[in-house]
Image (cartoon, helix red, strand yellow):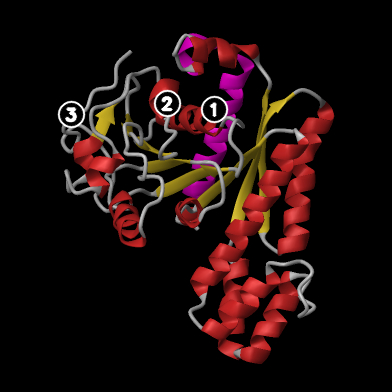
Amino acid sequence: MSINQNSLSVKRAGPALGPTSIIAVGGGKGGIGKSFISTSLAISISQLGHSVTIVDLDLGAANVHTCLGGTIPEKSISDFVTGRVSDLRAITSNTPFQRLSFISGSNDSFNIANLNPGAQERLMDELKKLPTEYLVLDLGAGTNNSILDFFLMADKKLVALTPEPVSVENAYRFIKSAFFRNLLRTENDLQVQTVVEDAMDQKNNLGIRTPADLINHVKKVNPLAGQRIAEAIDGFDLDILVNQIRARSDIDLGYSIASVCTKYFGISTNYLGYLDHDNAVWQAQRKRRPLITEYPHSRLVAQFLTIAKNLVHRQIKKAVV
């Protein structure tokens, strides 16, 4: 299979005003299958008849091209960031899958992973203009501000994890970081920002232990800011996806995490689904072939299709409402 970079502005069908839905896949820890999940979801959504663009934002360690079964494209995000190209469509590639296109983060310079705020904002603005129905963002590991900001720009925020304790711990850390990053971006009042930053420490001296405590404390400092913080918390929602499950307890883990997030952070958290541990995954990756084409009858393929239908159905329902 090959991934070809062409002028896709004519070939691709999609809304003129940008993506209908942006899906970000994060998780905080490397090695949990984010790129595999992002790629498989993108392929599954495209097979449902929707135009999709997957963007490899794991800058510095990009590998979506491998998951798609292709080679490294000649042009990547660094060409846009450095000004060698001015339009993201110039670095958008065809894939072997109908209705699915791809923007690579590979071949990037070593310092591209640390985008300056101006470059990041410009990239975000242009991503929102891409003529595609669904934009899937494959994020890097960690909790730096750039990763969190790309995660927060999505209207469907997927947190992927595996049942291992380290992965669960890192998922909680990622969710907490995204939660507070969202609040800091909501409020420009420096005094309020200081309160939010102090609240990030669970042992803070302000006595803030819950989102309700935080809202009440901010309202004492600035009533309007307190209302904005409350609205930001109310509007923040997540999807949990557990990868590589082997036992019933692994499946139940997703419900536990969703429940804790709802109770502790006061945010709407949905358990999107789970994915079986399957040797077909590494076998397909070793062959540099997508699971969906190499093992089309795998139970995992059916699970991805179910999750993709869930995401698309929710988007359609949201649009109708």
CA distance separating discs 2 and 3:
21 Å
- Report whether 139 appears left or right of 159: left
- To which quarter of the image does residue 26 belong? top right
Q: Is residue 308 magenta?
A: yes
Q: Residue at x 38, y 35 (%)?
A: 50
Nearer to us of marks 1 and 3 is 3
- Report whether 25 appears left or right of 200: left
Q: Residues within 10 Å of mark 3 (few under 14, many from 20)?
A: some
The residue positioned farthest toward the right in the image shown: 249
Q: Are marks 1 and 2 in contact (CB under 8 Å)?
A: yes
Front one among 105 and 7:
105
Element type at mark 3: loop
Residue 305, numbered circle? 1
Q: Is residue 89 above or below residue 237?
A: above
Q: Is residue 86 above or below residue 104?
A: below
Q: Is residue 15 magenta?
A: no
Q: Residue at x 40, y 30 (%)?
A: 46
Residue interval drawn in magenta: 292-317
Residue 47, numbered circle? 2
- To which quarter of the image does residue 243 belong? top right
Residue 85 picture location, percent across and down: 17, 44
Residue 218 picture location, percent across and down: 65, 83
Front one among 294 and 138:
138
CA distance separating discs 1 and 2:
9 Å
Q: Residue at x 72, y 67 (%)?
A: 201
CA distance separating discs 1 and 3:
28 Å
Element type at mark 1: helix
**Residue type at the position of mark 2:** Gln
- Report whether 262 appears left or right of 298: right
